[in-house]
Image: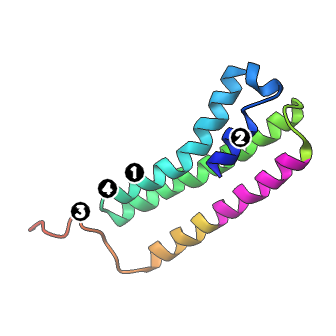
Amino acid sequence: MFKKVIELTKEGPVCSDFRFKSQIRAAAGSIMDNIAEGFERDSRLEFINHLNYSKGSTGETRSQLYRGNDMNYWSEEKAISLIEEYKQIASHIANFIKYLNTCDISGNKFKDRQL
């Protein structure tokens, strides 16, 4: 998905809007970055927290896609297609969060600590 945002922002009028281009790329990249960071923290609750940040970044990316469409940076067809894909990603993340909230996995962070 991130690659699609990069491709979308490589040409056309969006190229001269450096702030906007940087913002949409950062939002799209933040999705996977937050998943990776949360996973590496070795705590289920911290992972869930970062998954929520990641889900928020899908919303921010969708917002940027709508804005870019409103500014005629790309075709509405391209925007709608990507928006739908980012909605699916948000749904998958939400379902994963629901699963993690119901499972017994706690992570390794506190595994070897003695009380």
Please say whether residue 88 is one of the residues in the magenta stretch.
yes
Q: Secondary structure at mark 4?
A: loop
Which quadrant: the C terminus? Answer: bottom left
Please say whether residue 8 is one of the residues in the magenta stretch.
no
Kind of residue at disc 2: Glu
Name the residue tied to disc 4: 41
> Which residue is located at x 58 percent, y 64 percent?
93
Mark 2 neighbour density, 10 Å: few (under 14) some (14–19) many (20 or more):
few
Q: CA distance from mark 3 to mark 2?
A: 38 Å
Mark 1 neighbour density, 10 Å: few (under 14) some (14–19) many (20 or more):
some
Q: 5 and 104: which one is in front?
A: 5
Say if mark 3 contacts mark 4, CB within 8 Å.
yes
In the image, residue 57 above or below residue 64? below
In the image, residue 29 above or below residue 13? below
Kind of residue at disc 1: Glu
In the image, residue 21 above or below residue 47? above
Q: CA distance from mark 1 to mark 4?
A: 7 Å
Q: Secondary structure at mark 2?
A: helix
Name the residue tied to disc 2: 7
Name the residue tied to disc 3: 109
Q: Secondary structure at mark 1?
A: helix
Give the label on residue 37, or none.
1
Say if mark 1 contacts mark 4, CB within 8 Å.
yes
The percent coordinates of residue 114 (x first, y second) are 8, 68
Magenta residues span 77-91
> Which residue is located at x 46 percent, y 79 percent?
102
The kind of secondary structure the magenta stretch mainly shows is helix
Q: Secondary structure at mark 3?
A: loop
Q: CA distance from mark 2 to mark 4?
A: 31 Å
Dot placed on the residue nearer the N-terminal end, 3 or 2: 2
Q: CA distance from mark 1 to mark 3?
A: 14 Å
